[in-house]
Image: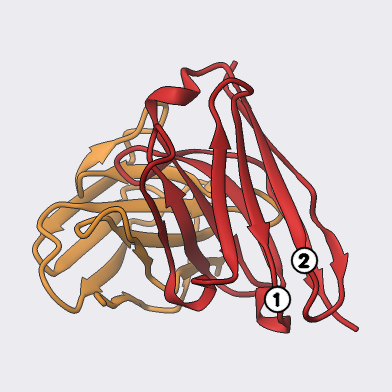
Chain colours: A red, B orange
Amino acid sequence: EVQLVESGGGLVQPGGSLRLSCAVSGLSFSNFWMTWVRQAPGKGLEWVANIRQDGGEKHYVDSVKGRFTISRDNAKNSLELQMDSLTDDDTAVYYCTRDLLGMDIWGQGTTVTVSS
Amino acid sequence: EIVMTQSPATLSVSPGERVTLSCRASQSVSSNLAWYQQKPGQAPRVLIYGASTRATGVPARFSGSGSGTEFTLTISSLQSEDFAVYYCQHYNNWPAYTFGQGTKLDIK
């Protein structure tokens, strides 16, 4: 069974940092681009970042460039998102997804709340 | 940046009805378009990719059409489990993506 399980969400103050993880099982993780997508409360979906199979190419939505860093560990089948200088606008559920003709497999999401 | 516009924002329909959702791109995305369904408290699920190809396990009542800038998702006979929010998303300038704002299907 394919599973993507996110963790690391929580409550953080503005300006703070958080590191999200996604544990992947049931698929050949190292063969696929992977993506983070977020959804603010009551809002739509927003692509955040994605990363090539070998980690050598990364892309970010403009609003997180310079603050977020996507990475992966193919030996551990793990995807990460380091989030720094967080603002209220980063409050959202963050989903880990497989990047294949859109996003064909999703985790259940982890909630990040930025608030003082 | 390519902007995806979905219409209507909300649609009230009765079970058994045929429903068509629209998605328009601000410039051509060829057939590089996917549709997702999201139910409350759940992650999105891909329904359609390549504008018209059903994803694995998606019922045949769901169909997608269009290319270029105009796309539709049709549900031939609405079932109770289909009441959800539907998003379109282009991947024409992959690896960057843009989603539409969503269409919510409500029970009439």
Q: CA distance from mark 1 to mark 2?
A: 6 Å
Which amino acid does the dot numbered 1 rest on? Ser
> Image quadrant of residue A30?
top left
Within 10 Å of the Cα at label 2, are there few (<14), some (14-19), or many (20+) other Cα atoms?
some
The residue wearing badge 1 is A85
Looking at numbered disc 2 in the image, what kind of residue is underneath it? Ser
- Along the horizontal axis of the image, is A93 left or right of A79? right
Disc assigned to residue A17: 2
The residue lying at 59 percent from left, 70 percent from top is: A67
Picture quarter with the N terminus of chain A: top right
Q: Using the image, determine if residue B104 lies above or below residue B82.
A: below
Where residue B68 sits: x, y (%)? 8, 64
Taking the spot 85% from the left edge, 80% from the top edge, the residue there is: A115
Pick whichever, B42 or A36, lies toward us: A36
Q: Residues within 10 Å of mark 1 (few under 14, many from 20)?
A: some
The chain letter under disc 2 is A
1 and 2 marks in contact (CB < 8 Å): yes
Q: Subunit of mark 1? A: A
Helix, strand or loop under label 2: loop
